[in-house]
Image (spheres, coloured by chain):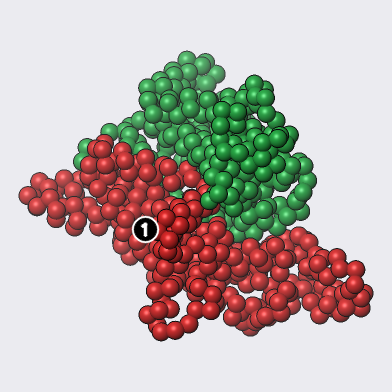
Chain colours: A red, B green
Amino acid sequence: MGGFILRRLAISIPLIIVSSFVVFLLVAAAGDPLAELRGNPNTPKSTIEARRHQLHLDKPVLVRYGMWAKGAIHGDFGRSFVTGEKVGPKLWRAIGVTMRLLAGSVLLAVLFGVMIGVVAALRQYSKFDYLATLFAFIFFSMPVFWLAAVLKDVGIRINEAVGHTWFFTVGEESPGLAGSFVHVWSDRLGHLVLPALSLILIQVAGWSRYQRASMLEVLNADYVRTAKAKGLPPGKVIVRHALRNALIPVVTLVAIDFGLLLSGAVITETVFAWSGMGRLLITGLQRQDINVVQAWLLVSATMVIVFNLVADVLYGYLDPRIRRA
Amino acid sequence: MLEPRPAPGPLPGAPGPGVPEPGAPDELVEFGVEVRSQWRLVLGRFFRHRLAMASLFLLALLVVVAFLGPHLSRHDYTKPGPDLSQAPSIHHWFGTNELGIDTFAQVQRGAQRSIEVAFLVAFLSTTFGSIVGALAGFYRGWIDTVLMRLTDLFLTIPTLAVLLVVAARYRGSRNSWIPIVLIIAGFTWMPLARLVRGVTLSLREREFVEAARAVGASNARIIFRHILPNSLGPIIVNATLVVAGAILVETALSFLGFGIQPPDVSLGLLISNGVQAANTRWWLFYPPGFFLLLFCLAVNFVGDGLRDAFDPQQTRVRA
C-alpha cells in the first residue's frame, strides 16, 4: 500500500510542475499588471520603470517562472502584485473560509444524498422515486449562480417581510465582528445558511442519483438474495449487506468531489461575497496577480491529486478485490 | 468544473451508463441490413419513451421560439422604446429594462446565442474527444501514453483559470462568442476521450475488427467505419451531457464577466445583468433563468431517454 501511494505521488509531481508552468505562461500572457499605473497620465515614467523592475517584469517569462518556482519550493509564494501582502497568509485565510463553508455542507449533502438515494432505490418507480428524480434533474440543470441568486433574493424578501435580518446575504461574517465565542460563531453560522444551502442542493442532486444507481445494482446481487433467503430480517439485509457495499463507489466519488470543491465554490462565493479560495482566484486573475494565481493553483492541483489518491486508497480498503487485482 | 457535478445518474428505467451493445457485427455495415435494424430498434425504444419524447418536443418548441419568434415580434432586442422599466404586460410579455428594451426580445436573442454555443461546443468537443480516445485505444503503446498524459494534464489545469485568462483577451469584441466556444470545447473533451478509449480497447479485440483487417481494411477505415460507429451509444449520450454542461459554463463565465460580451446577448449575460434587479424588477432576472432551466432540463431528459434506448438490457431491476 505504501509503495502504491508513493508511486502515485511520484507520477503526480511532474503533472503539477507542467500545470503550474502552463498557468504561469497563460497569466503572464493575459495582460499587463501595470496597466492601471500606465493608464494614469500623472505617473512619472521612472515610477513605472521602478515598479517593473521590482516585480521582475523586465525579465523574460522563463526566468520569472524559475524565480517563482525556486521560492515556492522553499515555501515562499512571494507577494501580491497589487497589495504587496505576502501571499502565504492570504492563502491560509482563504482556505479557512472555504473550509467553513464546505465542512458542514458536504456532511449534510452526503447524509441527504445517501438517504434519498437508498429510499429511491428501495421503492423504485414509486412516487418518492419520481419526485427525487425530478428534484435531481432540476438542480442538475440549474446554473449555480442562478440558484444562489434566487436563494439570495428569497432571503432578502423574507427579511423584508419579517422586518428583521433572518438571512445574511453578504460576506462570511459581519464586518468588524468581535465579542464572545458564542456571538462570533452564531454570526458566522447565520452567514453560512444560504451559501451552504445552494451547495447542498446541487451536491445532493448528483450524489443521490449515484447512490440510487449503486444501490439498485447491489440489491440485484446474489449475496443479497442469499442474505434474504437465509431469513435475515429485511432491515439487516438492507443495512449490513446492501448499503455497506453500495456505499463504496459513493464514498470515492465524494472524496474526489471534495478535492474539487476545495479549490473554491467559485460561483457561490462570488454571489454571496465570501472571500474564500474561489474569490482569491477570481480577483487574482482579474488583476493579473500572478503570484496569487500560482499559489492558488498549487493548492488546488495538490488537493485534486491528493483526494483522487484518497479515493483510490479508500476503494482498495473498502473493497479488497480491487487491491488484489 | 466550477462546482463539480457528478453525472446525474440514470432515471428510473436505466441504471448504468450507456455501454455499447454487443451484437450487430460491423462487417455488415457494407450490406446495411443488420445495422439498420439495430438503429431502428434504438429509435423505436426512444420513441416509446414518453418523458424523452415530451422533452424533445419542448426542446424543439424552445428552439422555434428562440429562432423564429423574433421575426414575428414587433420588438427588437437592440432598440430602446418609450416604456422604461415596465412590469410584464400585454405589450411587453416579460417587461422592459431601464432603457426600454423589451425583455422577451432579449431573451429570444440571448437564447439563440446560448443554443448556438451549446451545440457548437458539443459538436467540437465530441468530435475531438472521440478521435483522441479512438486513436489512443486503437494504437496503444506510446501514442496511448502521450494522448492520455495530455488528457490528464488538461484535467489538472484548472479549467476556470484558463477560461478566464483566455477569455479576458477577447473582452469587448463583438464576435466574442467564437473564441468562447473554442475555449469551452477545448476543456470539455477529456471525459469522452477516456470513455471512448476504454470502449475502443475492448472493441479492437473483437472478431469484426479482425475480419475487417483480414479483408485488407486500412487502420483509418477500421477506426472510422468500424470502431467509432460501434461506440456511438456512449458518444451520443455524452454529447447531450455536454450540450447542457456548455450552456451552464457559458452562463457562469458571462456571470463572472468573462463570457459573451455586450452588445451581443446571451442568457448568461441577461441573468447576470438581472441579478442586481432581482429584488426590485424580478422580470429582468427570472425569465432568462427559467428559459435556461427548461432548456437544460429538456436536454438532460432527452439524453436520459437515449441512454435507455441504447442500453435496454439494464432497464428493469427487481429488488
Residue B195 in the image: state x and y as whole percent. Answer: 50, 44
Report the residue at 12% width, 47% height from top: A228
Name the foreground residue: A97 vs B105: B105
Q: Is residue A22 left or right of residue A217?
A: right
> Residue B299's spot in the image, x, y percent?
49, 34
The residue type indicated by label 1 comes to: Ala
Residue topped by disc 1: A109
Nearer to me, A276 or A160: A160
Write down the quadrant of residue B161 in the picture: bottom right
Split into 4 quadrants, where in the image is the N terminus of chain B?
bottom right
Between A293 and A142, the one lying in front of the other is: A142
| Mark 1 element type | helix
Q: Residue B4 in the image: state x and y as whole percent.
A: 49, 55
| Number of residues whose C-alpha sits closer than 10 Å to that of mark 1, classed few (under 14), some (14–19) or many (20 or more) | many
Q: Is residue A310 left or right of residue A245?
A: right
Please tell me whether residue A111 is drawn above or below residue A67 in the rendered image: above
- Which residue shows up at 49% across the image and 62% down it? A169
Quick check: B54 above or below A38? above
